[in-house]
Image (cartoon, grey):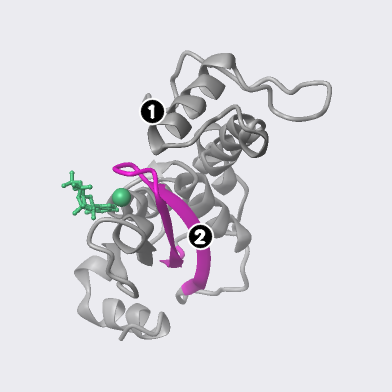
Amino acid sequence: MDGRNKTEFGVAEIGADGKVVVPDAVAEAVRTLIRWAGDNPTREGLRDTPARVARAWKEYCAGYTDDPAKHLSRVFEEVGGYDEIVLLKDIPFQSHCEHHMAPIIGKAHIAYLPGNYVVGISKLARVLQAFARRLQVQERLTAEVADCIWNNLKPVGVAVVIEASHACMTARGVRTQGVTMVTSRMMGVFRDDERSRKEVLALMGRG
Ligand SMILES: Nc1nc2c(ncn2[C@@H]2O[C@H](COP(=O)(O)OP(=O)(O)OP(=O)(O)O)[C@@H](O)[C@H]2O)c(=O)[nH]1
Ligand SMILES: [Zn+2]
C-alpha cells in the first residue's frame, strides 16, 4: 500500500438502510462546494445531494479498498502448452483525474506472454478496475496495471495500452472534444524484442 488510501475516515460504515453512512464533515464539504458553485444547498432539489455525491465518490474511488494483487493470486499452471500472447482488448473503464477529479473515460488493452502461469482472463480487467477506481493520472494507471501483472504473474512480457478522453479537457479548460490520450507500458520481451512488440501492437489493432 502506498499511503494514498490512509485517511482519517477508516472503513466506511454501512447504515440500517444498507447505504454507506456519510460523515457530517463530508456532507458539509459538498454543501460548501454547492454554495461556491453559486447555488443554495438547502433548496428542495439539492437537499439530498451532499449524501448522494459523497456516496457516488465512495463508489468512484472503490479501488482504494480493492487490493489489485489479490485478483492475481489464483493462477493456473496447466494450459495445454499454450505459449503465445494472451490479450484482453477494448476493456472499458472509468477513472478520475487527480488534478480536477473529473472523469477519465477510455479503454485498455492488456496483454501478457505467459511464463509458467496464466490467470482467469477476467482478472486482468479486475486489476484495471482496482487501479482505475482511484484518483489517477493516466500514465500512473498504465504503469500500475503493467507492474502488478509483471510482479505477480512473473510472465515473459507485459504490454498495456490505454486510450482515454479526459473530461478536464473536454468539459472545461481547453475544451477540446474528441481528443484521446494514449499511454503504454511495455515490459520484458515486449520492451526488448522489436518483433514481439510489433506482434502485440498488431493484435491490439495499433500496429
Ligand atoms: N499527463 C497527464 N496530465 C493530465 C492528466 N489528467 C489531466 N491532466 C492535465 O493536468 C494538467 C493540470 O494543469 P494545471 O495548469 O495545473 O491546471 P489547469 O490550470 O486547470 O490547466 P488546464 O486544464 O490547461 O486549464 C492539465 O494540463 C490537464 O490536462 C493525466 O492523466 N496525465
Ligand atoms: Zn484533469
- In the shown orientation, is residue 206 left or right of residue 50? left
Q: CA distance from mark 2 to mark 1?
A: 21 Å
Element on which disc 1 rests: loop
Stretch of the chain drawn in magenta: 86-114
Q: Say which of 80 and 88 sits in front.
A: 88
Q: Residue at x 28, y 76 (%)?
A: 197
Against 122, is 70 above or below?
above
Element on which disc 2 rests: strand
Main secondary-structure element of the magenta-colored stretch: strand
**Label 2, on which residue?**
93
Label 1: few (<14), some (14–19) or many (≥20) C-alpha neighbours in 10 Å: few
**Label 1, on which residue?**
4
Tell me where residue 15 appears, x and y as whole percent.
77, 21
Residue 102 magenta-highlighted? yes
Quadrant where the C terminus sits is bottom left
Against 195, is 164 above or below?
above
